[in-house]
């Protein structure tokens, strides 16, 4: 069924050279499928896509719940009303060959979703001496123009092979049961547009958001020690998304779930890398009891003054 949809998309492109096609880039650098499943509708699916290429293979390396959150992404894409064809793309760390492709592809196979592996193609050819790493990626992770062209060619090869091998037949789709507990399929991202927490010192960001890459908007800002924000949400899984900034020093905050201060979580706004501000995701609750939970975040006192304010982007609940 999934392959049939792919052929339909590819034939439409090849057979209608004068047709207009709209490309939506829903990618956000440095983010994993936990964040991805919460924004799939607003950043991709609301455009009613015919074909979606999804890749979290590198950034999910540090996502301890990646099997379940990536399954949530796949199920959300496949169940959408436009019934898009879906292809999983597996990128890779070129210096080490590390990725989460084995986990992602096992899930993709379960749903009959095809996958294109950079590790099994471009990376292997590089290791065999066909390319020098520096010629296709300057930092061992992000492809340059030549690297992107090679990746695009692998996707094109796959689409051509599908078109050549499959006889298109319409049939009733059979949707498999979830492989994981699948708590994240209907994850929601809560910003100032979706929830009104109790503010004590924190204030809502009033600047207009201009697009999905205009990251640090629609959130809440805490500037001084003691500023606090209080949420009440019904969920079994909770994560907090906040800014880690290179504008040091930055404010830090303490998160308390359900009033349990002995298990408080530090939210450190200082980023120890230099490539830019990070959309950091702190996991707070995973497979807890589905009930009303309280989340309290309070700015901590610092020994230094003039810290960069703490920016809380959202809560993600499921």
Image (cartoon, rainbow, N blue to C red):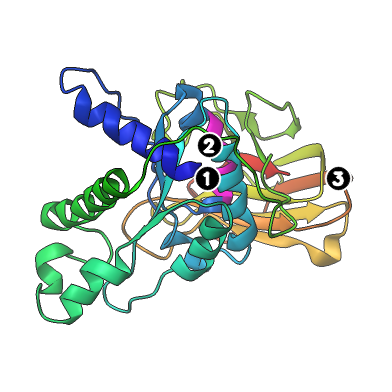
The circle drawn on residue 221 is: none
Quick check: is 38 in the magenta stretch?
A: yes
Q: Is residue 278 magenta?
A: no
Identity of the residue drawn at 36% across and 32% down: 8
- In this picture, is 193 found above or below 110? above
Q: Which residue position is annotated with label 2?
A: 40
Please indicate whether residue 233 sits to the left or right of residue 52 in the image. Answer: right
In this picture, residue 48 sits left or right of residue 236: left
Callout 3: helix, strand or loop? Answer: strand
Q: Is residue 169 left or right of residue 123?
A: right
Quadrant of the rendering where the C terminus is positioned = top right
> Does the CB distance between marks 1 and 2 fall below 8 Å?
yes
The circle on residue 293 is 3
Is residue 95 visible to us here? Answer: yes
**Which is more foreground, mark 3 or mark 1?**
1
Q: Is residue 301 above or below residue 231?
A: below
Q: Secondary structure at mark 1?
A: helix
Which of marks 2 and 3 precedes in the sequence? 2
Number of the front mark, 3 or 2:
2
Question: From mark 3 to mark 2, how far is it between C-alphas?
Answer: 25 Å
């Amino acid at each position: 069924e999934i392959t049939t949809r792919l052929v339909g998309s590819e034939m439409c492109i090849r057979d209608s050279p004068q047709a207009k096609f709209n490309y939506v880039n829903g990618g956000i650098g440095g983010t994993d499928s936990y964040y991805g499943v919460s924004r799939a509708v607003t950043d991709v699916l609301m455009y009613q896509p015919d074909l979606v290429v999804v890749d979290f293979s590198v950034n999910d390396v540090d996502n301890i719940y990646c099997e379940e959150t990536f399954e949530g992404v796949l199920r959300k894409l496949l169940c959408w009303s436009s019934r898009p064809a879906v292809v999983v793309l597996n990128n890779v760390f070129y210096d080490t060959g590390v990725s989460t492709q084995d986990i992602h592809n096992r899930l993709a196979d379960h749903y009959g979703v095809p996958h294109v592996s950079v590790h099994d193609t471009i990376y292997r050819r590089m290791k065999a001496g066909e390319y020098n790493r520096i010629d296709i990626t300057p930092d061992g992770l992000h492809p340059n123009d030549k690297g992107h062209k090679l990746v695009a060619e692998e996707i094109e090869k796959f689409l051509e092979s599908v078109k050549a091998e499959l006889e298109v037949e319409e049939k009733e789709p059979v949707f498999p049961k979830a492989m994981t507990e699948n708590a994240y399929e209907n994850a929601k991202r809560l910003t100032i547009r979706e929830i009104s927490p109790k503010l004590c010192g924190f204030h809502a960001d009033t600047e207009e958001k201009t697009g999905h890459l205009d990251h640090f908007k629609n959130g809440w800002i805490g500037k001084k020690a003691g500023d606090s924000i209080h949420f009440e949400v019904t969920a079994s899984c909770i994560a907090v998304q906040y800014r880690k900034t290179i504008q040091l020093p930055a404010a830090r905050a303490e998160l308390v779930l359900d009033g349990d201060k002995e298990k408080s979580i530090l939210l450190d706004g200082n980023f120890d890398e230099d490539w830019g501000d990070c959309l950091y995701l702190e996991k707070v609750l995973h497979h807890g009891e589905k009930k009303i939970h309280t989340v309290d975040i309070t700015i901590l006192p610092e020994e230094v003054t003039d810290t960069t304010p703490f920016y809380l982007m959202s809560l993600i609940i499921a």
